[in-house]
Structures are given as C-alpha cells and as structure tokens.
Amino acid sequence: MKRMSRPKLEPFPFDAVHDLLAVCRAMTLAAPVAARARRMRLDAIGAALVHALELAYAHAGDRASPGFHAAWDAAAQAVRSLGDEIEALLPASTLVAAEDTQLDGVRRRKRG
C-alpha cells in the first residue's frame, strides 16, 4: 500500500482520513465475531485515525506546529496499519475474483 507522505506545510487530508475511518469501521463490522484479535486491531486503528483528526483540527491554523506534524505522523501510522489489515484479506478476495472470472468464461462457453 502506498504510504502517506508528510509534507511539511501541506494541508492535512481531512477527507481522505475520514474516508479511511469509514473503511476501518466497515471492516470492523464485517469482521466475524470470532475474529476478536482483528476487531481489536481495527478498533485501535480507528482510534488512531480519530486521534489524528483531532490533532489536525486542533492545529490546522499552524501547519508548522509540532501538533500538526504529530497529526500527519499518527495518520500515516494508522494508514500503514490499515493497509496491513487490508492486505491480509486481499489474497482471498483476489482468488475469489479470479475464480469468478474463470467461471464466467465457462458459462459463456456453455451458452455459445
């Protein structure tokens, strides 16, 4: 997964972090109850994204402040962690998509 860079004076990507928080929450809801460890990791990632947003809102007026840079750092770490969770699920979804494509080709050959 591509890493978020921390430009020194760039605006904080509020919309992107909100979107990632929504993805994290959806993944938490979709995780089976038996996958307690995954749900706990996702809860922690969501909390880190919320913390990053809170820091960014609190320091948005001073992009050179340590708090604003801490917001970028917190968001970047949370995004890396969320990427790890997504990558853990990706192989299965890739296999399912490949199988669906293969089955679709078989269906077309049978019809043809």
Image (spheres, rainbow, N blue to C red):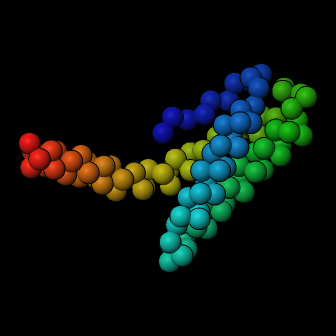
- The answer, for residue 46, to whether it is visible in the render is yes
Query: How far across and down, in percent of the image, does residue 109 sit?
Result: 9, 45
In the rendered image, the quadrant that contains the C terminus is top left
Residue at the (78%, 50%) spot, across then down:
51
* Residue found at x 88% / y 35%: 59
Image quarter for residue 3? top right
Q: Is 59 positioned to the left or the right of 88 in the image?
A: right
Q: Position of residue 48 (x, y in %)?
A: 71, 52
Q: Is residue 77 visible?
A: no
In the image shown, does 78 or 97 lie closer to the viewer?
A: 97
Q: Residue furthest bottom?
A: 34
- Point out residue 65 in the picture as x, y percentages from the top left corner: 86, 31
Q: Residue at x 44, y 50 (%)?
A: 87
Up the image or down, 36 lies above or below 51; here it is: below
Q: Position of residue 46 (x, y in %)?
A: 68, 55
Please indicate whether residue 40 sits to the left or right of residue 108 in the image.
right
Instruction: Out of 76 and 57, give the one closest to the viewer.
Output: 57
Residue drawn at 51 percent across, 34 percent down: 2
